[in-house]
Amino acid sequence: MIAEEFCQGRPLVIDIFMKGGRSKLTCIHDVEFSATSFAIKRLRSPAQLPLAVRDRLEATAERLCLALGVTDGPADFDVILGTDGRERVIEANPRVGGDGITKLIAAAYGVDNVRALISLALGEPFDVHLKPTRTAHAAVEVISSPLNVDGELIRWEGVAEARAVPGITDLDLQAQPGDSVRPHSQSAHKIGLLVAAASSAEDASASLEKASALIGPIIRPIKGAK
């Protein structure tokens, strides 16, 4: 048995890219989980936080990177901002973020942290890919099976309509007709990503909501699946 402290508060994700032991880019996102699991359903960036809180979270991420030996490169931290105002780090990953976070950061800030990581690995200058070229609000939604049993993807509906919604910057379908799909009990079971960006958090969320209502995977339960 593994027992962990229950941390109550606001879930956040901190993505940081270090250069020379200091943050070159720090992005903090709000997190919304699936209704049936702790798999991420939606992320919004930037999280609306007081500047002092944001600065403190960035400093915490920097210290963690140095403790992990990450002086150059990316890291991704899951954090709970407690009701007492203190942050508690519940997961640390020395890599770029998953669940569409690279697309989210690109939509919000116009940076490419994947290209930055590749440049770093090749020994090339990488910080040029981390300079923000815009300041927007962005949101990403994980598309998953609506079933609680294994199924087979029959077709996608509403793809063209969802892509045509103003503010939608990316629609990435990761499953094709005939593929087996599983309930969204973990990140690896997602079947697509939907990304929106706008000048305000409200407009980005509205675009995502509209597109999300249009697109739908048609999935047939697999006989005998549990």
Image (cartoon, rainbow, N blue to C red):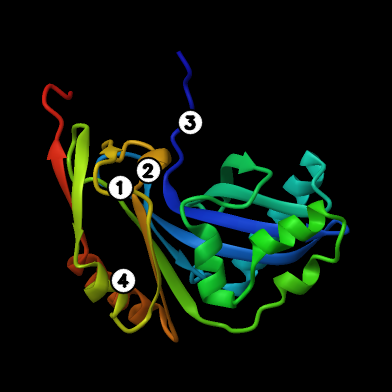
| Residue under the image location 42 percent in, 44 percent down | 8
**Residue 139 in the figure: left or right of residue 103:** left
Q: Which residue is mark 2?
A: 39
73 or 35: nearer the eye?
A: 73
Q: CA distance from mark 4 to mark 1?
A: 16 Å
Mark 3 and 2 residues: CB-CB less than 8 Å, in contact?
no
Does dot 1 land on a helix, a strand or a loop?
loop
Amino acid identity at mark 3: Glu
Q: Residues within 10 Å of mark 1 (few under 14, many from 20)?
A: some
| Mark closer to the chain start, 2 or 1 | 1
Q: How far apart are labels 4 and 2 at the CA level?
A: 18 Å
Compare marks 4 and 1 and give the one earlier in the sequence: 1
Q: Is residue 52 above or below residue 33?
A: below
In terms of image quadrants, where is residue 200? bottom left
- Give the alpha-carbon distance from disc 2 to disc 1, as whole Å: 6 Å
| Tag 2 and tag 1, C-beta contact below 8 Å | yes
Q: Secondary structure at mark 2?
A: loop
In this view, the residue in front, 121 or 63, is: 121
Q: What kind of residue is marked 4?
A: Leu
For disc 3, the marked residue is 5
Residue labelled with disc 1: 34
Identify the residue shown where x is 19% and y is 32%.
149
On residue 208, the disc is: 4
Q: Is residue 25 left or right of residue 181?
A: right
- Whichever of labels 3 and 2 marks the residue nearer the N terminus, that label is 3
Give the quadrant of the C terminus: top left
Circle 4 residues within 10 Å: few <14, some 14–19, many ≥20: many
